[in-house]
Amino acid sequence: MDKSTIADIMRRFSISKASAINDNMVHKDIALLNAGPYSRPTHVTLNLSTKCNYNCPICSINKAKKLFPKYHNNMISKETVERMHSFFDYSQSVSFMGLLGEPLLNPDFFNIVDYFRKNTTASLAVSTNGLLLTKENRDNFISSSFENLTFSLHAASEHVYEKLQAGKFKRTVDNLKSLIQERNSKKQIYPKLSVVHAINWWNIHELPIFMDLMKEAAPDSVYIYHYHDYQGIKDNISLKNGDAQLANQLINSAYDYAKKIGIHEIISPQDPPVITAQVKKTDVIFNDKISCDLPWRGLQMRGCITHADSHYVGCCNVFNIFRLNYKEFKEPFRNVWHHPVLKYIRETLRDETSNPLCRYCKSPERAYLKATDNKKNNDRKAMALAEFYNAFNARFGDVSQFDSKGLTALKEDPADIRLE
Ligand code: SF4
């Protein structure tokens, strides 16, 4: 074994040991409900591009482009990621997702992958529309043993794909099949391929054809989302309460069909419950203790389109706490991680009465509204957020006093986040 190989093994060993120690510390911080944890985040989401090569009618990117003429196509560089090393150093998983955009458009994509490979032991994941999975990119994914690749494929035919994703159906499906075949022929297990398919009234009738397509392509897993409210899109795309019975019949028969053709094991379970069951759940008074460890584990850096070189940052995808300009912010990571708002969430998450935002987040009401009336869900969340900051301000004073260069606390969800 040459010296560089030995050095590489030693380096990986010391990184993984440090990561294991951090994980141990996370457990202790959570057990003690430590508001200013010694540990660092283990699960990171990092948006690499707010630009997209598609213009899916069902994506909020369309509304965003109309509402924000100064739409910023932000792409973080490898140099910036390196400078922000302490944001990611102990991460166990890093997901290149985070709201809008196609990650593979970032010209530094594989350089950033290389940075994470060399400096962390994190498993990597990306969500893509698949158009840029050229032979070169497919080879890069396979040779870097990139762990998880998720395709968004919401149609099983050219014309429905055109309506929902307005892209190149055949090329996308061919790229998916080629990647699976090339990976298998090299006897590699990575990347694992998942397909995400969100059901709505425009595609639900071709669900059996979609099952056939999945049998042919043979990805590792298929996630079928039963309900989502696409705010403001016309032509009755969203499933409504009155549609539940027919929708459920169609879903049931498609799952029966998946079983018949032998692919049920790769399809996600038939949960979440159907809309009628969710309605019943809202009748239950919510009094469970909140169990969430994301304020200790999670770091979400989501795409921001209203400001240059910026991310929305929080510990989960519900609460966007700051806008962080990654070119301007030069302070230590603890100024984010130990920010008074994050400390306050950790303190109040599991209180007898818990803070209003986390309480709303975990309520059955939210699950129901997200599926049936996302506008109402956003309004309810805005109320919970206002209550949260009323309580925070009463204790600490106005949150803006903690702002610094490149770091701005958000008192409400920004307009581009509300488009989701
Ligand atoms: S808002 Fe929800 S996901 Fe975020 S910290 Fe609170 S309970 Fe956890």
Image (cartoon, rainbow, N blue to C red):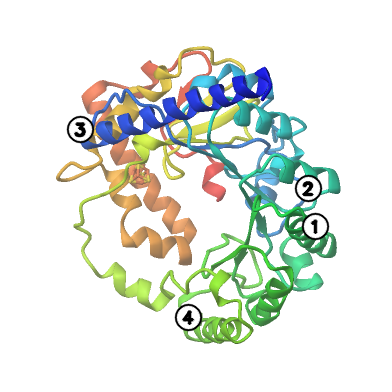
- The residue that disc 3 covers is 32
Under circle 3, the secondary element is: loop
Q: Is residue 307 visible?
A: no
Under circle 2, the secondary element is: helix
- What is the quadrant of residue 223 in the picture? bottom right
* Residue 193 x/y as whole percent: 65, 57
The residue at the point 66 percent across, 77 percent down is 211
Q: Nearer the viewer, mark 2 or mark 1?
A: 2
Q: Residues within 10 Å of mark 2 (few under 14, many from 20)?
A: some
Cα separation between marks 4 and 1: 34 Å
Q: Nearer the viewer, mark 4 or mark 1?
A: 1
Question: Ligand 1 is located in which of the four quadrants?
Answer: top left
Cα separation between marks 4 and 3: 44 Å
Name the one closer to the observer, 57 or 218. 218
Cα separation between marks 3 and 2: 45 Å
- The residue that disc 4 covers is 244
* Residue 212 x/y as whole percent: 70, 78
Picture layout, residue 393 above or below residue 417 = above
Question: Which label number is shown at residue 175?
Answer: 1
Residue type, mark 4 in image: Ala
Under circle 1, the secondary element is: helix
